[in-house]
Amino acid sequence: MRTFNYTFQREGNELTIYFEGKLDSVYSLELEDHLEPALKGVKKLVLDFQKLHYISSAGLRIILTCKLTMNEQGEMKIRNIDPQVMQVLKITGFAEDLNIE
């Protein structure tokens, strides 16, 4: 049974990625393969974590990849963070460097 899903929604040069479930090493490589082409030409990236309930270090690497790409191309924000995921972001220091709504 699949424990993680993601959906890309693009409008012009804005991309929203909706995350659902548990982002761990099993699914992070798959997402990473789809991420690079999806980010081409994006000026505004939104990561929607409303339905994301767990994130591993591999998932944090995905966030870092997005942030580094968007530092060169435009802006990135994260919205609708589950409290458990927010705790991971705070403990790891990621929350300090991210635009979180």
Image: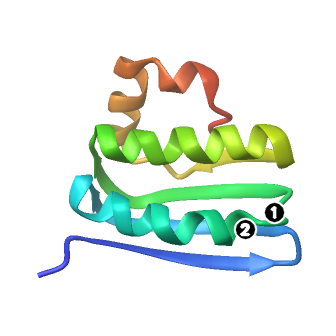
Residue at the image point whose x is 71% and y is 46% from the top:
69
**Whole-percent x and y of residue 56?**
27, 42
Q: Are marks 2 and 1 in contact (CB under 8 Å)?
A: yes
Structure colour scheme? rainbow
Q: Quadrant of the C terminus?
A: top right
Instruction: Place residue 75 in its image quadrant.
Output: top right
Instruction: Place residue 67 in its image quadrant.
Output: top right
Residue sitting at the far left: 1
Alpha carbon separation for disc pair 2 and 1: 6 Å
Q: How many residues crowd mark 1 within 10 Å: few (<14), some (14–19), many (20+)?
A: many
Q: Is residue 79 left or right of residue 31?
A: right
Q: Is residue 101 visible?
A: no
Pointer 1 residue: 42
For the residue marked with disc 1, what is the amino acid? Answer: Val
Pointer 2 residue: 15
Q: Is residue 84 left or right of residue 8?
A: left
**Whole-percent x and y of residue 100?**
62, 37
Relative vertical location of residue 77 with respect to residue 41 in this rendering, above or below: above
**Whole-percent x and y of residue 20?**
36, 68
For the residue marked with disc 2, what is the amino acid? Answer: Leu
**Whole-percent x and y of residue 34?**
52, 72
Residue at the image point whose x is 45% and y is 59% from the top:
50
Q: Secondary structure at mark 2?
A: strand
